[in-house]
C-alpha cells in the first residue's frame, strides 16, 4: 500500500494519483501538481488515502503545494485568456476557410502553451492557422483533433435520464458499445432511444452490462416453457430489474396471465415435451423470509398525517362535548315552549340572577323580584310614572272620537294612576 491523493483536471472525469509529498490535503482543496507538461492546477477529489501499488502508475509525481491566493489569481487570468483565444481562433478559422469545429481552449498554468481542441470529419491542413495564432499569442500553439465523444465530455450537459453526462462525471475512458448489449437489457433497438447526445450508443449500456448479465441468469427467457408453483406454462413477459415473470398456465382456459417471482418458477430444460410425455419436475421452491427491514424503512418514509389531534384534558375525557349539530336537531325535534320568549329548551333552565334593590321615587327600597319558575326569568313589577304630555296615537284617536264633556275609560284610568303617592313622612 502507498499513500496517495486523487485529483482531477478541470473536472473532466478521469482521476490521477499523486504523491502527497508530506502535505495534509483534504477533499475540495486546489493543489499545484507536477506533470509531464509542467506545473498545473488541479482539484483534489480524495485527500490522503492508501492505494494498492498495482493501481498506481509509476513514476508517481508529487504535489508541489496547496494553491495559494496568488496561484488562484493566475488561474483566473488564464480563464480570461482562454475566452479571448477562443474568439480569435474562430475568426481565423473563418478567414482560412477550414472545415473544423473549435471545441475548447486550454492555457497551461505557467502560461507558455495554448492548446486548441477541435473536431472535423477528415484531415485538416492547419499550418497557416498555427503561424497566425503563434504571432498573436507569442507562445507555443498546439492544435489537437478529438472525437465526438471527447467533445461531449468537454462541453458537458444533461442526458435523456435527467442527469449529467456519465462521461463528464465519472467515466475515465471510453469502451466499445454494441447493439447486443441493448438486446440483453430488453431495450428498443431504435437508434434515437439508445443513442446519446454525441450520436453514438450510450455509455451506460456498457458499464451496466455486467449487472444485467447476472440478472438474466436468475429468470427464464421470454417464450420459455417453465414450471411454476401452480403448474406448467409459458413465460410471456420478463421484467429483469424487478425479477418477475408473467406466465400463461396450460391449465387456464382463458388467456389470463399470472405474475411470479424468480424463485417461484424455473425453466424446463429441453423446452415443452412432446404430446403424451410428462414434463419433468425441476422446481425446488423455497419461500422467501419476510423482510422486516424494508417494512421499517417504509414506516419511516410514510406520508405523515396533516391533522394534528387536539390535546385531551381530564374534563374532556370524562364529559365529551356535545356536537352543535346534535343540539340543533334536538331543538328542532323538541321545539320551544309556547309563550316562552326566551327560546330555551324544555329541559334547560338558566341560573337565577340576583338583582340589586332599586329605589323608587318615594325613597322606599323595592322588594326582591319574584322568580318565574316556568320561564326561568325574573318578573318585574311595573313602576308608576308621571303622565307625559304626548299621548299615544291609539288613545288620541279614542279621545277624538268621544263626545265633549265626557272622558273615556282609558283617560280616567290614566288620571287615577297619575296621582302621586304620599311618602312615609307626609301626613
Image (cartoon, helix red, strand yellow):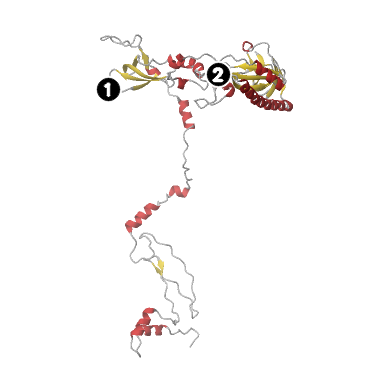
Q: Considering only vertical position in the picture, is 415 above or below 118?
A: below
Compared across the picture, whether 197 is left or right of 239 comes to: right
Q: CA distance from mark 2 to mark 1?
A: 51 Å
The image quarter containing residue 138 is top right
Compared across the picture, whether 406 is left or right of 87 comes to: left
Q: Considering only vertical position in the picture, is 343 above or below 280?
A: below
Question: How many residues crowd mark 2 within 10 Å: few (<14), some (14–19), many (20+)?
Answer: some
Q: Residue 52: x, y in percent?
A: 63, 13
Disc 2 + disc 1, Cβ < 8 Å: no
Question: How many residues crowd mark 1 within 10 Å: few (<14), some (14–19), many (20+)?
Answer: few
Q: Which mark is residue 383?
A: none
Residue nearest the observer in this picture, 389 or 193:
193
Q: How many marks?
A: 2
Mark 2 vs 1, N-terminal side: 2
Give the structural element (helix, strand or loop) at label 1. Answer: loop
Q: Which mark is residue 254?
A: 1
Q: Residue 126: x, y in percent?
A: 63, 16
Residue found 74% across the figure and 27% down from its top: 70
Q: Residue 92: x, y in percent?
A: 64, 22
- For disc 2, the marked residue is 149
Give the structural element (helix, strand or loop) at label 2. Answer: helix
Compared across the picture, whether 228 is left or right of 8 comes to: left
Compared across the picture, whether 137 is left or right of 274 comes to: right
Residue nearest the observer in this picture, 170 or 396:
170
Quadrant including the N terminus: top right
Residue 11 visible, this orientation: no
Q: Residue furthest right?
A: 70
Residue 336 visible, this orientation: yes
Residue found 47% across the figure and 85% down from its top: 422
Q: Residue 103: x, y in percent?
A: 60, 22
Q: Choose mark 2 or mark 1, whichever is in front.
A: 2
Residue nearest the observer in this picture, 396 or 195:
195
Amino acid at each position: 500500500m502507498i499513500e496517495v491523493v486523487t485529483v482531477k483536471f478541470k473536472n473532466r472525469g478521469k482521476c490521477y494519483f499523486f504523491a502527497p509529498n508530506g502535505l495534509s490535503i483534504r477533499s475540495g482543496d486546489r493543489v499545484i501538481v507536477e506533470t509531464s507538461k509542467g506545473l498545473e492546477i488541479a482539484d483534489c477529489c480524495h485527500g490522503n488515502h492508501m492505494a494498492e501499488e498495482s493501481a498506481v502508475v509509476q513514476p508517481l509525481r508529487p504535489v508541489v503545494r496547496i494553491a495559494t491566493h496568488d496561484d488562484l489569481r493566475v488561474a483566473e487570468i488564464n480563464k480570461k485568456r482562454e475566452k479571448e483565444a477562443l474568439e480569435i481562433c474562430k475568426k481565423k478559422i473563418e478567414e482560412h476557410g477550414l472545415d473544423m469545429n473549435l471545441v475548447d481552449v486550454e492555457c497551461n498554468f505557467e502560461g507558455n502553451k495554448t492548446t486548441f481542441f477541435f473536431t472535423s470529419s477528415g484531415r485538416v491542413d492547419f499550418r497557416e492557422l498555427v503561424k497566425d495564432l503563434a504571432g498573436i499569442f507569442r507562445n507555443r500553439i498546439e492544435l489537437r483533433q478529438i472525437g465526438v465523444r471527447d467533445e461531449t465530455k468537454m462541453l458537458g450537459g444533461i442526458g435523456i435520464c435527467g442527469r449529467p453526462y456519465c462521461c463528464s462525471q465519472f467515466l475515465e475512458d471510453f469502451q466499445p458499445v454494441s447493439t447486443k448489449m441493448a438486446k440483453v437489457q430488453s431495450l428498443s433497438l431504435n437508434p434515437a432511444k439508445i443513442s446519446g447526445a454525441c450520436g453514438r450508443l450510450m455509455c451506460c449500456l456498457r458499464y451496466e452490462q455486467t449487472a444485467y448479465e447476472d440478472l438474466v441468469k436468475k429468470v427464464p427467457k421470454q417464450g420459455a416453457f417453465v414450471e411454476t408453483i401452480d403448474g406448467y406454462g409459458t413465460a410471456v413477459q420478463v421484467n429483469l430489474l424487478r425479477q418477475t415473470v408473467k406466465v400463461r398456465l396450460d391449465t387456464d382456459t382463458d388467456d389470463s396471465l399470472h405474475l411470479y417471482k424468480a424463485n417461484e418458477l424455473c425453466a424446463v430444460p429441453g423446452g415443452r415435451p412432446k404430446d403424451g410425455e410428462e414434463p419433468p419436475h425441476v422446481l425446488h421452491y423455497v419461500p422467501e423470509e419476510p423482510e422486516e427491514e424494508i417494512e421499517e424503512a417504509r414506516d419511516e418514509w410514510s406520508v405523515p398525517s396533516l391533522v394534528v389531534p387536539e390535546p385531551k384534558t381530564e374534563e374532556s375525557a370524562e364529559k365529551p362535548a356535545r356536537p352543535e349539530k346534535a343540539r340543533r336537531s334536538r331543538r328542532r325535534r323538541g321545539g320551544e315552549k309556547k309563550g316562552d320568549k326566551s327560546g330555551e329548551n324544555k329541559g334547560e333552565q338558566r341560573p337565577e340572577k340576583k338583582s340589586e334593590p332599586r329605589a323608587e321615587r318615594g325613597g322606599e327600597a323595592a322588594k326582591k323580584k319574584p322568580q318565574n319558575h316556568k320561564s326561568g326569568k325574573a318578573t318585574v313589577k311595573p313602576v308608576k310614572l308621571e303622565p307625559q304630555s304626548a299621548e299615544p296615537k291609539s288613545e288620541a284617536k279614542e279621545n277624538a272620537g268621544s263626545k265633549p264633556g265626557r272622558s273615556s275609560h282609558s283617560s280616567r284610568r290614566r288620571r287615577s294612576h297619575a296621582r302621586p303617592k304620599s311618602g312615609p313622612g307626609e301626613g
